[in-house]
Amino acid sequence: MLCKLGWWSAFLNSISGLKFLVSERAFRQELYVGVALVVVELCRSSSAMVLCYIAISYILVLLTEAINSAIEATIDRISLEKHHLSKKAKDIGSAAVLIAIMHLCIAWVVSFFL
């Protein structure tokens, strides 16, 4: 019984995290653009492999944004005071999101040639 409650509690914490993410403007923008991208791929009659790769690349963007949001929340929890290490941590998290978005863009452009 305790094991089930632990799993349920973890699930509820995850739902709470998803609610937080959806409340963030950047995540919502990525969500909308990604959904539109997948719809375009479905309309293009892409192969299942291409569609799967685009979807995985898109999920990578959302995952990276979630981790970046966690980094930013942690830094803000520690201190709102400006500090070069706080800026560095936030900038690296943002760079990770940019890299994931670039990966998605490259995958999408390449899909037109497959």
Image (tube, rainbow, N blue to C red):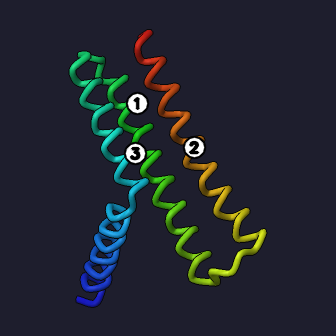
Q: Return the x and y of residue 73 as percentages of the image width and height.
A: 53, 73
Which is more N-terminal, label 1 or label 2? 1
Q: Residue at x 44, y 37 (%)?
A: 57
CA distance separating discs 1 and 3? 10 Å
- The percent position of residue 62, horizontal first and vertical second, equals 42, 50
Badge 1 or badge 3: first in the primary sequence: 1
Q: Are marks 1 and 3 in contact (CB under 8 Å)?
A: no
Q: Give the x, y percent position of residue 18.
A: 33, 65
Cα separation, mark 2 vs mark 1, equals: 18 Å
Residue at the (60%, 53%) spot, across then down: 94
Of the residues under marks 3 and 2, which one precedes in the sequence? Answer: 3
Residue marked by disc 2: 98
Q: Nearer the viewer, mark 1 or mark 3?
A: 3
Q: Residue furthest bottom?
A: 2
Q: Label 1: which residue?
A: 53
Residue topped by disc 3: 59
Q: How many marks?
A: 3
Q: CA distance from mark 3 to mark 2?
A: 14 Å
Task: Name the amino acid, label 1.
Answer: Tyr
Crowding at label 2, few (<14), some or many (≥20) Cα neighbours within 10 Å? some
Element marked by disc 1: helix
* Viewer-nearest residue: 57 or 25: 25
Quarter of the image with the C terminus is top left
Label 3 is placed on what type of residue? Ile
